[in-house]
Image (tube, rainbow, N blue to C red):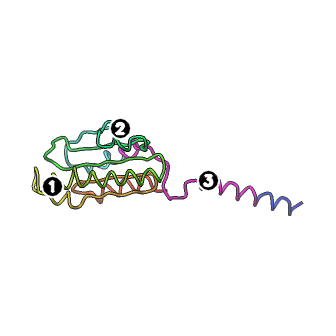
Amino acid sequence: MKKILLVLSLVLTMGLVGCSSSSSNGYKNVSSSAVQKAIKSSNLLVEMSMDYDIKDFEYFNDVEELIGEGFIIRAAMNVRLEDVIFIKATNEENAEKIYTTLESYKKEMVIKPFGDGYGAEENTTIAASTIVEQKGNYVYLISAKNAADIEKVIIDTIQK
């Protein structure tokens, strides 16, 4: 009887572990609004900013069906560079495709206009240190004075 109970408990434990590890990539299933709230409450954004839903931003029309949800935080004045784009893709394969689009965005919408110092002088440095990353189903771009600190907030929010 003890052997049967032991075998049954092992089978149940393995079943529970198998079911609970469906997201083995090390990232939680977090809404983009939770990440946005964490960034806003961190007080790391230095510019007056405006928030947009990612699906309202025409640049991403080509990959819109791959996007689950997301947001953009941009400096209110277009001569200042402070962009945070966060996208939660429908799956990891789609996140890879969105990552390619974000790399294009970085070249066309960050490096090209701001790389030569359009607006404030510091824009050149900020543009050069723009972060574009994919973490599981999440993809983000950060162009800001304190991009590494903002990235830490994102990672702390999505990581298990």
Residues rendered magenta in the picture: 10-37
Q: Picture coordinates of residue 49 (x, y %)?
A: 23, 42
Q: Looking at this rendering, what residue extends furthest in the top direction?
A: 56
Q: Is residue 42 above or below residue 50?
A: below
Q: Looking at this rendering, what residue extends furthest in the bottom direction?
A: 3
Mark 2 or 3, closer to the camera: 2
Q: Secondary structure at mark 2?
A: helix
Q: Picture coordinates of residue 131 (x, y %)?
A: 29, 58
- Position of residue 53 in the picture relative to residue 110 (left or right): right
Front-lying residue, 138 or 46: 138
Front-lying residue, 107 or 21: 107
Mark 2 or 1, closer to the camera: 2
Q: Residue under label 2, please give it.
A: 55
Q: Picture coordinates of residue 32 (x, y %)?
A: 40, 44
Q: Residue 150 occupies which quadrant of the picture?
A: bottom left
Q: Say whether disc 3 or disc 1 marks the residue closer to the N-terminus.
A: 3
